Image (cartoon, coloured by chain):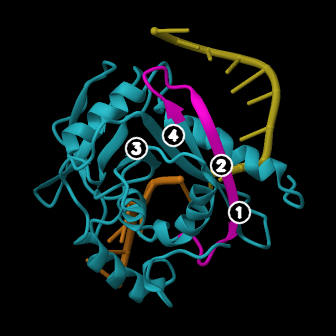
Chain colours: A cyan, B orange, C yellow
Amino acid sequence: MTDHPVPAEWLHPPDPASARRAQTALAERVVREDAFGEVRLLGGVDVSNNRFDPEQRVFAAVVVLSLPDLRVVETAGAVARAAMPYVPGLLGFREIPALLAAWEKLRTKPDLVLVDGHGIAHPRGLGIAAHLGVVLDVPAVGVAKSILVGAPDPPLPEEAGTETPLLWRGERIGTALRTRRRANPLYVSIGHRVSLDTAVAWVRRATGGYRLPEPTRQAHLAANAVRVAEAGSPR
DNA sequence: GCGACAG
DNA sequence: ATCTTGTCGC
């Protein structure tokens, strides 16, 4: 529901095939090395959906946390109609428009954002975290709750705090991280302008007590709040 | 051709 | 993603 200074094809491809071509092109713009200064504010983004919403709206939220306390200092929400249904591998095209609208409402932008979904651990190297990072040209980290492609190798230990490489076609695409004992691991990958080591370090630093790091966890709660607050989206 | 498949 | 309270186990 907002205009943005980026080519339309980056967000609104006419069809799935075009979307995949756009991803392949956009993946080349992803910066896989650290390219940012001091991080004073950490961001978290996530979206919520109502499976019975005939309007197929996407409820997005962006939260900003202070460091080192990890307290939410600002929250912004927005709603946008989904341009396409959920298709594995094309998540960004469905959720990013709403996220951008929420991002625009922020009074203060975070220095680095944790995104709920994969970064480059994606078939074409452009998961939603990398996609959003490139569109906003902001340092971003992908924090997914399950695997899209690849497999952990060697197996991840049971202990909290352990990690193991996420490999795919012989390439290192991310890291499986056990943030909590007896909880499924998180899959961290480069989003944009961060190295994998730095990405994992930030997820570790932002995690406390829960399986999900605070930025993503708070964004999830905020996105649900946006949906509940929205009139006409019951159940 | 047959499964797998972020949120 | 979401439907949903209590319950089992550490």
Write the start and end of the magenta stretch as one range: A65-86
Three-letter amino acid code of the residue under disc 4: Thr
Which chain hosts label 2?
Answer: A
The residue tagged 4 is A216
Residue named by callout 2: A76
Q: CA distance from mark 1 to mark 2?
A: 11 Å
Q: Is residue A165 above or below residue A170?
A: above
Of circles 1 and 3, the one toward us is 3
Q: Is residue A6 visible?
A: yes
Q: Amino acid at mark 3?
A: Asp
Give the label, 2 or 4, closer to the camera: 2
Circle 3 residue: A111
Q: CA distance from mark 3 to mark 2?
A: 16 Å
The answer to whether the residues at label 1 and label 3 have Cβ atoms under 8 Å apart is no
**Mark 2 surroundings within 10 Å by alpha-carbon count, few (fewer than 14), some (14 through 19), many (20 or more):** many
Mark 1–mark 3 distance (CA, rounded to whole Å): 24 Å
First in sequence: mark 4 vs mark 3: 3
Name the residue tied to disc 1: A79
